[in-house]
Image: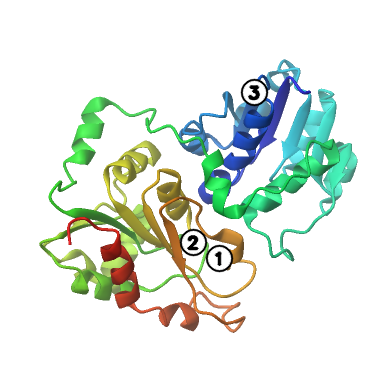
Amino acid sequence: MFSKIIISRTDNLGDVVLTLPLAGYLKTKFPNTEIIFIGKKYTQNIINLCSYVDVFLDKEEIIKDNTILENLNADVILFVFPDKQLAKIAKKVKIKNRVGTSNRWFHWLYCNKLAYFSRKKSNLHESELNFKLLKPLKISDEKIELKNMWQYYGTKHSIENITENRKNEIKKYIDKNKFNLILHPKSKGNGREWGLDNFQKLIDILPTDKFQILITGVKEEGEMIKNQLPQLFEHQNVINLTGQLNIPDFLTLIEASDGLVASGTGPLHLAALLEKLAIGIFPPMKPIHPTRWKPLGKNAHYFCVDKNCNDCKKTQNCSCMQQIAPEEIKNMIISHSKHV
Protein backbone atom coordinates (compact mmCIF):
# COMPACT_ATOMS: atom_id res chain seq x y z
CA MET A 1 0.00 0.00 0.00
CA PHE A 2 2.78 2.42 0.97
CA SER A 3 6.46 2.04 0.14
CA LYS A 4 7.78 4.32 2.91
CA ILE A 5 6.12 5.55 6.09
CA ILE A 6 7.77 8.12 8.38
CA ILE A 7 6.91 8.25 12.08
CA SER A 8 7.93 11.55 13.65
CA ARG A 9 8.19 11.63 17.45
CA THR A 10 10.66 14.28 18.49
CA ASP A 11 10.15 14.42 22.25
CA ASN A 12 11.42 12.34 25.16
CA LEU A 13 12.41 8.77 26.02
CA GLY A 14 9.19 7.38 27.48
CA ASP A 15 7.07 8.98 24.76
CA VAL A 16 9.32 7.46 22.10
CA VAL A 17 9.16 3.99 23.66
CA LEU A 18 5.36 4.07 23.66
CA THR A 19 5.40 4.99 19.96
CA LEU A 20 7.41 1.93 18.93
CA PRO A 21 4.34 -0.36 18.86
CA LEU A 22 2.97 1.83 16.07
CA ALA A 23 6.08 1.02 14.04
CA GLY A 24 5.67 -2.65 14.88
CA TYR A 25 2.05 -2.71 13.82
CA LEU A 26 2.74 -0.97 10.50
CA LYS A 27 5.66 -3.27 9.71
CA THR A 28 3.61 -6.33 10.58
CA LYS A 29 0.71 -5.18 8.43
CA PHE A 30 2.92 -4.00 5.55
CA PRO A 31 6.11 -6.13 5.67
CA ASN A 32 7.53 -4.60 2.51
CA THR A 33 7.04 -1.01 3.69
CA GLU A 34 10.11 0.84 4.91
CA ILE A 35 9.53 2.33 8.36
CA ILE A 36 11.51 5.50 9.07
CA PHE A 37 11.57 7.10 12.51
CA ILE A 38 12.47 10.76 13.05
CA GLY A 39 13.51 11.61 16.60
CA LYS A 40 15.95 13.55 18.69
CA LYS A 41 19.51 12.31 18.38
CA TYR A 42 19.69 11.18 22.00
CA THR A 43 16.76 8.81 21.44
CA GLN A 44 18.46 6.98 18.57
CA ASN A 45 19.74 4.11 20.69
CA ILE A 46 16.22 3.46 22.00
CA ILE A 47 14.62 3.60 18.55
CA ASN A 48 17.28 1.28 17.16
CA LEU A 49 16.22 -1.35 19.71
CA CYS A 50 13.01 -1.78 17.69
CA SER A 51 13.48 -4.38 14.97
CA TYR A 52 10.56 -2.92 13.05
CA VAL A 53 12.25 0.42 12.40
CA ASP A 54 14.41 0.38 9.27
CA VAL A 55 15.94 3.86 9.44
CA PHE A 56 16.48 6.48 12.15
CA LEU A 57 16.78 10.14 11.20
CA ASP A 58 17.86 12.99 13.46
CA LYS A 59 15.47 15.94 13.47
CA GLU A 60 18.26 18.52 13.62
CA GLU A 61 19.98 17.04 10.57
CA ILE A 62 16.74 17.33 8.59
CA ILE A 63 16.33 20.95 9.64
CA LYS A 64 19.87 21.67 8.47
CA ASP A 65 19.36 19.84 5.19
CA ASN A 66 15.78 19.53 3.93
CA THR A 67 16.87 17.32 1.04
CA ILE A 68 17.29 14.43 3.53
CA LEU A 69 13.51 14.32 3.84
CA GLU A 70 12.94 15.08 0.17
CA ASN A 71 15.21 12.30 -1.06
CA LEU A 72 13.32 9.68 0.91
CA ASN A 73 10.35 9.93 -1.45
CA ALA A 74 8.12 8.82 1.40
CA ASP A 75 4.39 8.26 0.94
CA VAL A 76 3.37 9.16 4.48
CA ILE A 77 4.60 11.14 7.47
CA LEU A 78 2.81 10.73 10.80
CA PHE A 79 3.33 13.57 13.26
CA VAL A 80 2.81 11.59 16.44
CA PHE A 81 4.36 14.53 18.28
CA PRO A 82 3.42 17.91 16.78
CA ASP A 83 6.49 19.55 15.26
CA LYS A 84 5.97 22.80 13.40
CA GLN A 85 9.43 22.87 11.80
CA LEU A 86 9.21 19.34 10.41
CA ALA A 87 5.60 19.79 9.31
CA LYS A 88 6.58 22.84 7.29
CA ILE A 89 9.47 20.96 5.66
CA ALA A 90 7.24 17.95 4.91
CA LYS A 91 4.86 20.19 2.96
CA LYS A 92 7.75 21.93 1.22
CA VAL A 93 9.22 18.65 -0.04
CA LYS A 94 5.74 17.45 -1.06
CA ILE A 95 5.27 14.30 1.00
CA LYS A 96 1.95 13.08 -0.32
CA ASN A 97 0.20 12.18 2.96
CA ARG A 98 0.99 14.43 5.93
CA VAL A 99 -0.96 13.43 9.03
CA GLY A 100 -1.29 15.50 12.20
CA THR A 101 -3.82 16.16 14.93
CA SER A 102 -6.49 18.78 14.35
CA ASN A 103 -5.83 20.66 17.60
CA ARG A 104 -2.55 22.22 16.41
CA TRP A 105 -3.06 25.26 14.18
CA PHE A 106 0.06 24.62 12.11
CA HIS A 107 -1.22 21.19 11.14
CA TRP A 108 -4.04 22.95 9.31
CA LEU A 109 -1.38 24.78 7.31
CA TYR A 110 1.12 22.02 6.67
CA CYS A 111 -0.77 18.71 6.95
CA ASN A 112 -3.34 17.52 4.43
CA LYS A 113 -4.88 14.81 6.61
CA LEU A 114 -6.10 15.52 10.14
CA ALA A 115 -6.88 13.19 13.04
CA TYR A 116 -9.57 14.52 15.34
CA PHE A 117 -8.86 13.57 18.95
CA SER A 118 -7.50 15.06 22.15
CA ARG A 119 -4.77 13.32 24.11
CA LYS A 120 -5.32 15.45 27.19
CA LYS A 121 -9.00 14.57 27.55
CA SER A 122 -8.80 10.92 26.53
CA ASN A 123 -8.93 7.88 28.81
CA LEU A 124 -6.87 5.85 26.36
CA HIS A 125 -3.26 4.85 26.89
CA GLU A 126 -0.60 6.90 25.08
CA SER A 127 0.27 3.96 22.84
CA GLU A 128 -3.39 3.56 21.85
CA LEU A 129 -3.72 7.25 21.08
CA ASN A 130 -0.82 7.01 18.63
CA PHE A 131 -2.85 4.61 16.50
CA LYS A 132 -5.50 7.28 15.95
CA LEU A 133 -3.07 8.91 13.49
CA LEU A 134 -3.80 6.00 11.14
CA LYS A 135 -7.51 6.76 10.81
CA PRO A 136 -7.14 9.49 8.12
CA LEU A 137 -5.16 6.99 6.03
CA LYS A 138 -7.94 4.41 6.33
CA ILE A 139 -5.33 1.79 7.10
CA SER A 140 -7.25 -0.09 9.73
CA ASP A 141 -9.87 0.21 12.43
CA GLU A 142 -8.84 -2.98 14.19
CA LYS A 143 -8.43 -2.75 17.94
CA ILE A 144 -5.19 -3.94 19.53
CA GLU A 145 -5.67 -4.92 23.15
CA LEU A 146 -3.47 -2.87 25.43
CA LYS A 147 -2.24 -6.01 27.22
CA ASN A 148 -0.79 -7.19 23.90
CA MET A 149 0.63 -3.84 22.77
CA TRP A 150 4.16 -4.57 24.06
CA GLN A 151 4.44 -7.47 21.63
CA TYR A 152 4.83 -4.87 18.87
CA TYR A 153 8.04 -3.52 20.43
CA GLY A 154 10.12 -6.04 18.51
CA THR A 155 12.93 -5.50 21.01
CA LYS A 156 16.46 -6.27 19.88
CA HIS A 157 18.67 -7.11 22.86
CA SER A 158 21.78 -5.50 21.46
CA ILE A 159 22.88 -2.04 22.56
CA GLU A 160 24.57 0.15 19.96
CA ASN A 161 27.26 2.81 20.36
CA ILE A 162 29.01 1.18 23.28
CA THR A 163 32.32 -0.65 23.28
CA GLU A 164 32.84 -4.10 24.74
CA ASN A 165 35.21 -2.61 27.30
CA ARG A 166 32.58 -0.17 28.48
CA LYS A 167 29.97 -2.95 28.62
CA ASN A 168 32.28 -4.95 30.83
CA GLU A 169 32.91 -1.95 33.07
CA ILE A 170 29.18 -1.52 33.62
CA LYS A 171 28.58 -5.20 34.19
CA LYS A 172 31.07 -5.09 37.07
CA TYR A 173 28.34 -3.36 39.05
CA ILE A 174 26.14 -6.44 38.68
CA ASP A 175 26.23 -9.10 41.40
CA LYS A 176 25.29 -12.39 39.77
CA ASN A 177 24.39 -13.88 43.14
CA LYS A 178 21.84 -11.19 43.94
CA PHE A 179 18.76 -9.51 42.51
CA ASN A 180 20.11 -6.36 40.88
CA LEU A 181 17.58 -3.60 41.38
CA ILE A 182 17.82 -0.15 39.79
CA LEU A 183 16.17 2.65 41.75
CA HIS A 184 15.54 5.86 39.81
CA PRO A 185 14.17 8.23 42.49
CA LYS A 186 13.95 11.51 40.57
CA SER A 187 12.14 12.58 37.41
CA LYS A 188 13.97 15.74 36.27
CA GLY A 189 10.90 17.64 37.42
CA ASN A 190 8.74 16.04 34.71
CA GLY A 191 6.40 14.14 37.00
CA ARG A 192 5.28 13.41 40.52
CA GLU A 193 7.79 11.51 42.65
CA TRP A 194 7.40 8.84 45.32
CA GLY A 195 9.86 10.62 47.59
CA LEU A 196 13.40 9.90 48.76
CA ASP A 197 12.16 8.77 52.19
CA ASN A 198 10.18 5.97 50.57
CA PHE A 199 13.14 4.83 48.51
CA GLN A 200 15.19 4.88 51.71
CA LYS A 201 12.61 2.68 53.45
CA LEU A 202 12.51 0.30 50.51
CA ILE A 203 16.28 -0.15 50.66
CA ASP A 204 16.05 -0.71 54.42
CA ILE A 205 13.55 -3.55 54.13
CA LEU A 206 15.18 -5.40 51.23
CA PRO A 207 17.65 -8.06 52.48
CA THR A 208 21.20 -6.81 51.90
CA ASP A 209 22.44 -10.33 51.20
CA LYS A 210 19.86 -10.82 48.46
CA PHE A 211 19.75 -7.42 46.73
CA GLN A 212 22.24 -5.22 44.94
CA ILE A 213 20.87 -1.67 44.68
CA LEU A 214 21.92 0.62 41.82
CA ILE A 215 20.77 4.24 42.07
CA THR A 216 20.58 6.16 38.80
CA GLY A 217 19.77 9.67 37.61
CA VAL A 218 21.49 12.65 36.04
CA LYS A 219 24.31 14.44 37.85
CA GLU A 220 22.05 17.21 39.17
CA GLU A 221 19.70 14.64 40.66
CA GLY A 222 22.59 12.90 42.38
CA GLU A 223 23.64 16.21 43.95
CA MET A 224 20.06 16.82 45.02
CA ILE A 225 19.92 13.43 46.74
CA LYS A 226 23.23 14.09 48.51
CA ASN A 227 21.84 17.38 49.83
CA GLN A 228 18.41 16.08 50.81
CA LEU A 229 19.06 12.51 51.98
CA PRO A 230 22.75 11.53 51.76
CA GLN A 231 22.19 8.30 53.69
CA LEU A 232 20.45 6.90 50.60
CA PHE A 233 23.91 6.29 49.16
CA GLU A 234 25.47 4.97 52.37
CA HIS A 235 24.10 1.43 52.52
CA GLN A 236 26.67 -1.31 52.01
CA ASN A 237 24.73 -2.82 49.10
CA VAL A 238 24.05 0.51 47.31
CA ILE A 239 26.05 1.80 44.34
CA ASN A 240 25.61 5.43 43.33
CA LEU A 241 25.65 5.71 39.53
CA THR A 242 24.02 9.13 39.24
CA GLY A 243 25.68 11.30 36.62
CA GLN A 244 27.89 8.47 35.37
CA LEU A 245 25.84 6.91 32.58
CA ASN A 246 24.95 8.04 29.08
CA ILE A 247 22.04 6.42 27.21
CA PRO A 248 23.99 3.39 25.85
CA ASP A 249 25.49 2.89 29.33
CA PHE A 250 22.08 3.07 30.97
CA LEU A 251 20.54 0.62 28.50
CA THR A 252 23.41 -1.77 29.12
CA LEU A 253 22.88 -1.50 32.88
CA ILE A 254 19.14 -2.17 32.55
CA GLU A 255 19.79 -5.11 30.23
CA ALA A 256 22.20 -6.61 32.78
CA SER A 257 19.97 -5.97 35.80
CA ASP A 258 16.82 -7.68 37.04
CA GLY A 259 14.42 -4.83 37.69
CA LEU A 260 13.78 -1.12 38.09
CA VAL A 261 11.56 1.06 40.29
CA ALA A 262 10.69 4.62 39.27
CA SER A 263 7.84 7.03 38.85
CA GLY A 264 6.27 7.38 35.39
CA THR A 265 9.52 8.48 33.74
CA GLY A 266 11.50 7.37 30.68
CA PRO A 267 13.67 4.85 32.56
CA LEU A 268 10.53 2.96 33.64
CA HIS A 269 9.52 2.48 30.00
CA LEU A 270 13.06 1.51 29.01
CA ALA A 271 13.02 -1.29 31.60
CA ALA A 272 9.65 -2.48 30.28
CA LEU A 273 10.97 -2.35 26.71
CA LEU A 274 13.93 -4.51 27.70
CA GLU A 275 11.56 -6.99 29.38
CA LYS A 276 12.85 -6.40 32.90
CA LEU A 277 10.70 -6.14 36.01
CA ALA A 278 9.48 -2.55 35.65
CA ILE A 279 7.56 -1.09 38.59
CA GLY A 280 6.04 2.35 38.17
CA ILE A 281 4.55 4.55 40.88
CA PHE A 282 1.87 6.95 39.65
CA PRO A 283 -0.48 9.63 40.95
CA PRO A 284 -4.24 9.22 40.34
CA MET A 285 -4.36 12.46 38.40
CA LYS A 286 -5.04 13.18 34.75
CA PRO A 287 -3.22 13.43 32.41
CA ILE A 288 -0.26 11.77 34.20
CA HIS A 289 -2.16 8.80 35.62
CA PRO A 290 -1.31 5.17 34.77
CA THR A 291 -4.33 4.80 32.49
CA ARG A 292 -2.41 7.07 30.12
CA TRP A 293 1.22 6.28 30.94
CA LYS A 294 1.60 2.86 32.57
CA PRO A 295 4.56 0.80 31.33
CA LEU A 296 3.88 -1.89 28.74
CA GLY A 297 5.62 -5.24 28.95
CA LYS A 298 5.32 -8.83 30.10
CA ASN A 299 7.07 -7.84 33.36
CA ALA A 300 5.62 -4.33 33.71
CA HIS A 301 3.58 -3.30 36.76
CA TYR A 302 2.42 -0.15 38.45
CA PHE A 303 1.07 1.14 41.75
CA CYS A 304 -1.51 3.89 42.12
CA VAL A 305 -4.08 4.58 44.84
CA ASP A 306 -7.65 3.95 43.74
CA LYS A 307 -9.15 7.42 43.76
CA ASN A 308 -9.56 10.52 41.63
CA CYS A 309 -7.41 13.37 42.86
CA ASN A 310 -6.31 16.73 41.54
CA ASP A 311 -5.20 18.24 44.85
CA CYS A 312 -1.54 18.39 43.89
CA LYS A 313 -1.82 19.76 40.36
CA LYS A 314 0.20 22.81 41.34
CA THR A 315 2.84 21.04 43.39
CA GLN A 316 5.37 18.27 42.84
CA ASN A 317 4.46 16.71 46.20
CA CYS A 318 1.74 14.10 45.84
CA SER A 319 0.19 12.82 49.05
CA CYS A 320 -1.55 10.04 47.11
CA MET A 321 1.80 8.64 45.98
CA GLN A 322 3.08 8.82 49.54
CA GLN A 323 0.28 6.44 50.54
CA ILE A 324 1.92 3.65 48.53
CA ALA A 325 3.90 1.73 51.14
CA PRO A 326 7.46 0.51 50.49
CA GLU A 327 6.29 -2.89 51.74
CA GLU A 328 3.96 -3.14 48.73
CA ILE A 329 6.84 -2.51 46.35
CA LYS A 330 9.03 -4.97 48.26
CA ASN A 331 6.39 -7.70 48.00
CA MET A 332 6.08 -7.17 44.26
CA ILE A 333 9.87 -7.38 43.81
CA ILE A 334 10.26 -10.47 45.95
CA SER A 335 7.44 -12.23 44.10
CA HIS A 336 9.56 -11.84 40.95
CA SER A 337 12.92 -12.67 42.50
CA LYS A 338 14.57 -16.07 42.30
CA HIS A 339 17.07 -14.96 44.93
CA VAL A 340 14.63 -14.77 47.85
Name the residue rendered at 51%, 47% in the picture: 13
Give the crowd class for mark 2: few <14, some 14-19, many >=20 residues within 10 Å.
Answer: many
Position of residue 306 relative to residue 293, above or below, is: below
In this rendered view, identify the residue nearer to me: 43 or 125: 125
Among numbered discs 2 and 3, the one appearing first in the sequence: 3
Q: Is residue 329 left or right of residue 31?
A: left
Give the residue type at disc 3.
Answer: Pro
Image coordinates of residue 150 in percent, x first then y, are 53, 46
Give the residue type at disc 2.
Answer: Gly
Among numbered discs 1 and 2, the one appearing first in the sequence: 2
Evaluate if marks 1 and 2 touch, with contact meaning CB atoms under 8 Å apart: yes
Position of residue 162 relative to residue 148, above or below, is: above
Give the residue type at disc 1.
Answer: Pro
Q: Which mark is residue 49?
A: none
Position of residue 22 relative to residue 285, above or below, is: above
- Quadrant in which residue 78 is drawn: top right
Residue 71 seen by the camera:
yes
Please, which colouring scheme is shown?
rainbow
- Give the mark toward the camera: 2 or 3: 3
Give how far apart the Cα atoms at labels 1 and 3 are: 32 Å
* Tag 3 residue: 31
* Tag 2 residue: 264
Image coordinates of residue 152 in percent, x first then y, are 56, 39
Q: Is residue 58 left or right of residue 222?
A: right
